[in-house]
Image (spheres, rainbow, N blue to C red):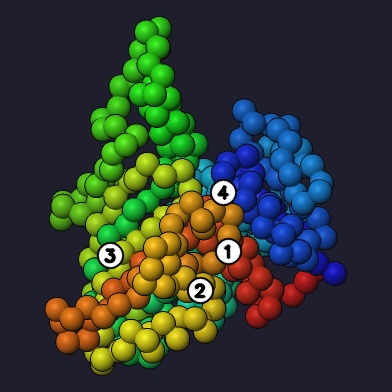
Amino acid sequence: MGYKVVVAGATGNVGREMLNILAEREFPVDEIAALASRKSLGTEVSFGDKTLKTKDLDTFDFAGWDIALFAVGSEATKVYAPKAAAAGCVVIDNSSLYRYDPEIPLVVPEVNPEAVEQYKNKNIIANPNCSTAQMVVALKPLHDRARIKRVVVSTYQSVSGAGKAGIDELWDQTKSIYNPTDDVAPKKFTKQIAFNVIPHIDVFMDSGETKEEWKMVAETKKILDKSIKVTATCVRVPVFVGHSEAINLEFEDFLDEDEARDILREAPGIMVVDKRENGGYITPIECVGEYATYISRIRQDSTIDNGLNLWCVSDNLRKGAALNAVQIAETLGNRCLKKG
Ligand code: 2RA
């Protein structure tokens, strides 16, 4: 006995990864439906060794379905998630639409698994922003040991965070630089991402932060601990997949770097790659397709009493989105959602 599972947004990068990961982890699926917008109707997507033809999200009847993983963006989520929830299907939504609703749990299973039990409020669970998910996985075991007071994080976010358009832009710009052809007018873009970095993700807010930076602050407080002070600088880098983060921590109590390394080595979802030698650290290219949140460059920050620096890398399409959503479904099943 398993669940009847829907993946909405099945033709997008995250939707495809949701299907891949449901199959890889052998999530107990009795029946699966892949949904897409009308323009992608009938597109074939893989589910393990099976091929699914996408159905129309607009006309789909969610009645009788148990769990719906949504990766359709906030606009479409606003229309279809309430329909699915009202039909009795538990929605796990990857958009930012519901993350800040106090009645809707925002969950990273390695950090706050118990929060899934609040799904009953609106039959919806929110998946965090990709840059938040990997960071709170790294922070949780250290916070439990030495209480984090402040986080200063700089991110190096891959272009796949901006979807297919982000990937295409890097690819096209790189080609046009390496192989300029007269008949292809360079596309107009605000800033070049190829061989460059851009300190701007999402929109600017009155505070001078970008919305991406604000999300990291708000979501860390909701998922882990509202007393933690967080300040972020989120930067787009010319990498296709894999977000990296340089994280500086200040604790209430002193935490030795070796003890921190041992704690992280034992923590769920984490792989420590940390040797003070050439290649003794993780880079984004090496995290692609993996489940782990990788931690390297663990070292004391001697400029403050109880400081620590670390480097955190993870596949933003997996732990940053699709894997976390499937893990929420697993946690839901293990804790409170009866099969069949
Ligand atoms: C980005 N975190 O990287 C945002 C949305 N996925 O663009």
Q: Amino acid at mark 4?
A: Val
Q: Which mark is residue 13?
A: none
Q: For marks 2 and 4, give the CA distance.
A: 21 Å
Q: For marks 3 and 4, give the CA distance.
A: 25 Å
Residue 255 is situated, as x and y percent measured from the top left of the image, at 30, 89
Looking at this rendering, what residue extends furthest in the right direction? Answer: 1
Question: Closest to the observer: 244 or 44?
Answer: 244
| Residue that mark 2 sits on | 270
| Residue that mark 1 sits on | 291
Q: Amino acid at mark 2?
A: Ile
Say which quadrant the N terminus sits in: bottom right
Neighbour class for label 4 at 10 Å: few (<14), some, many (≥20)? many
Residue 13 is situated, as x and y percent measured from the top left of the image, at 56, 44
Of label 2 and label 1, which has the lower sequence position? 2
Neighbour class for label 3 at 10 Å: few (<14), some, many (≥20)? many
Of label 2 and label 4, which has the lower sequence position? 4
Left of 58 or right of it: where is 44?
right
Neighbour class for label 1 at 10 Å: few (<14), some, many (≥20)? many
Q: Nearer the viewer, mark 4 or mark 1?
A: 1
Left of 163 or right of it: where is 227?
left
Q: Note whether residue 95 is visible.
A: no
Q: Which mark is residue 153?
A: 3
